[in-house]
Amino acid sequence: ELKVEQNPLFLSMQEGKNYTIYCNYSTTSDRLYWYRQDPGKSLESLFVLLSNGAVKQEGRLMASLDTKARLSTLHITAAVHDLSATYFCAADFGNEKLTFGTGTRLTIIP
Amino acid sequence: DSGVTQTPKHLITATGQRVTLRCSPRSGDLSVYWYQQSLDQGLQFLIQYYNGEERAKGNILERFSAQQFPDLHSELNLSSLELGDSALYFCASSRDPRRETQYFGPGTRLLVL
């Protein structure tokens, strides 16, 4: 079964702290995507990871991909309130359709 | 703004009815995808079109159908609507799905009463 699991589902963290969201997937995939969704809004693309060992950074967010472990991580550095949102990872299992994780609802507390 | 447009933004209808959701992809994108987002099912892939042809099918009900027209816009038709069809329906597009992300439209929020 093609499955993508994220944890944690909910994350409440203080401003200035670091944390990591984990994304595990069930079978071989060499394309992993991260999206952000604000309440009632659409999905905004954050990162596309296309190969083993890929690392991408944008501001306080950094994403990485380990295809051998079937794991991607989204690391948040020195969180700020603006990063409060739901974060989704999605895998392409070679069929060009995205299988999404359950999402991680991140709340940054001042 | 992703460049993908969807109409209408909101739709309220009754059970048993039929509705059509419309999507215009980003300029130059040949692939169009439809997704459903609901509280109990999460984000689910429904169907993909590439340059007018159906390319992949996901968890799309038989009551639902879609097509992509020569100008590349796409329509998702939902018929015999049930309460459980209430959800946010997203359209996404991409130029090269093997190398780049899918760009999502603003979505159509469907409420079936």
Image (cartoon, grey):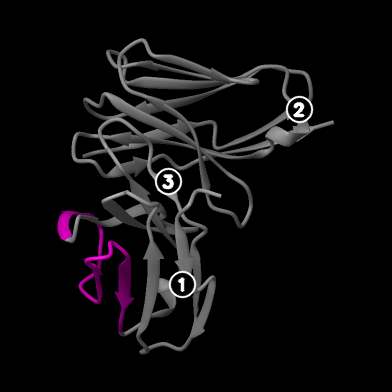
| Highlighted range, magenta | B53-79
Q: Where is residue B89 in the image (x, y as percent from the top left)?
A: 43, 63
Instruction: Check disc 3 and report the residue beneath it.
Output: B103
Instruction: Check disc 1 and report the residue beneath it.
Output: B86
The mark found on residue A80 in the picture is 2
SS class, disc 3:
strand
Circle 3 residues within 10 Å: few <14, some 14–19, many ≥20: many
Q: Say which amino acid is labelled 3.
A: Tyr
The C terminus of chain A: image quadrant: top right
Q: Position of residue B58 (x, y in %)?
A: 23, 55
Was residue B113 drawn as part of the magenta stretch in this picture? no
Quarter-of-image position of residue A5: top left
SS class, disc 1:
loop
**Nearer-N-terminus badge (1/3):** 1
Q: How many numbered discs, if any?
A: 3
Marks 1/3: CA distance?
23 Å
Does A78 appear above or below B46? above
Relative horizontal placement of residue B67, taking residue A83 as reference (left or right): left
The answer for which chain carries disc 1 is B
